[in-house]
Amino acid sequence: MIIETLPVGNLEVNCYIIGCEETGQAAVVDPGDEAGRILDRLAKGGLKVAAVVLTHGHADHIGAVGELKKATGAPVMIHAQDGEMLTNPARNLSAWLGEQLSFKPADRLLEDGDTIQVGTVTLEVIHTPGHTPGGICLRAGKDLFTGDTLFARSIGRSDFPGGSHTTLIKSIKSKLLALPEDTKIYPGHGPTSTIGEEKRHNPFL
């Protein structure tokens, strides 16, 4: 499995390219900005986008969705409870930033336990509400893409509309910390970590 990380935009969102070495198919996770740079990286790797997957609907994670959709035709996927955030600038917080980000509705609304097939790579959807109602993580074996749910030594904010600290902690403890300790986490911002490291050293847990 190919995993490439591109920090994009002013808030340095980690956009991930998850590729299948056998088929050359790829998923782009959280294309928050810099569509041209993302497309260049895909082209250099000879990868064809099979899915654009959003861990949640905040503006800094969805900014390049429209350009990627136009360039690749790949289906855009987001959890059902965050679906409106693609089309509503007030919900995705872009209106607060002086922008008006609005895109077409998602091609696929995800639910907990769904799978996304990218060549021979299977991404399992884990619903982890708290940062947003429809926040998700994506698991591929011992690799876990956590969006803004869990960071290295930190957790996502819960003070935005639709957020809940209690729900976020419950999501992390019940669904993520139950995974094997050597599971590597790839968060929406900042460096990688492991479930074991966060169990032992994350001050919020």
Image (spheres, rainbow, N blue to C red):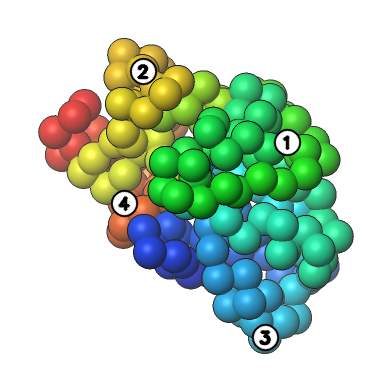
Dot placed on the residue nearer the N-terminal end, 4 or 2: 2
Dot placed on the residue nearer the N-terminal end, 1 or 3: 3
**Mark 2: amino acid:** Ser
Please give the label number shown on residue 193.
4
Dot placed on the residue nearer the N-terminal end, 1 or 2: 1
Label total for image: 4
Residue found 81% across the figure and 49% down from its top: 75
- Check disc 3 and report its element: helix, strand or loop: helix
Dot placed on the residue nearer the N-terminal end, 1 or 4: 1
Q: Which residue is mark 3?
A: 44
- Left or right of residue 190, residue 9 in this image: right
Q: Where is the C terminus found, in terms of image quarters?
A: top left
Of circles 4 and 2, the one toward us is: 2
- Check disc 2 and report its element: helix, strand or loop: loop
**Mark 1: amino acid:** Thr
Q: Where is the N terminus found, in terms of image quarters?
A: bottom right
Dot placed on the residue nearer the N-terminal end, 2 or 3: 3
Q: Which residue is mark 2?
A: 164
Badge 2: few (under 14), some or many (20 or more) residues near its Cα, within 10 Å?
some
Asked if the residue at tag 3 contacts the one at tag 2, i.e. Cβ–Cβ closer than 8 Å, the answer is no
Q: Which residue is mark 1?
A: 115
Badge 1: few (under 14), some or many (20 or more) residues near its Cα, within 10 Å?
some
Residue found 77% across the figure and 44% down from its top: 104
Of circles 3 and 4, the one toward us is: 3
Asked if the residue at tag 2 contacts the one at tag 4, i.e. Cβ–Cβ closer than 8 Å, the answer is no
Query: Of 30 and 177, which appears nearest the observer?
Result: 30
Badge 3: few (under 14), some or many (20 or more) residues near its Cα, within 10 Å?
few
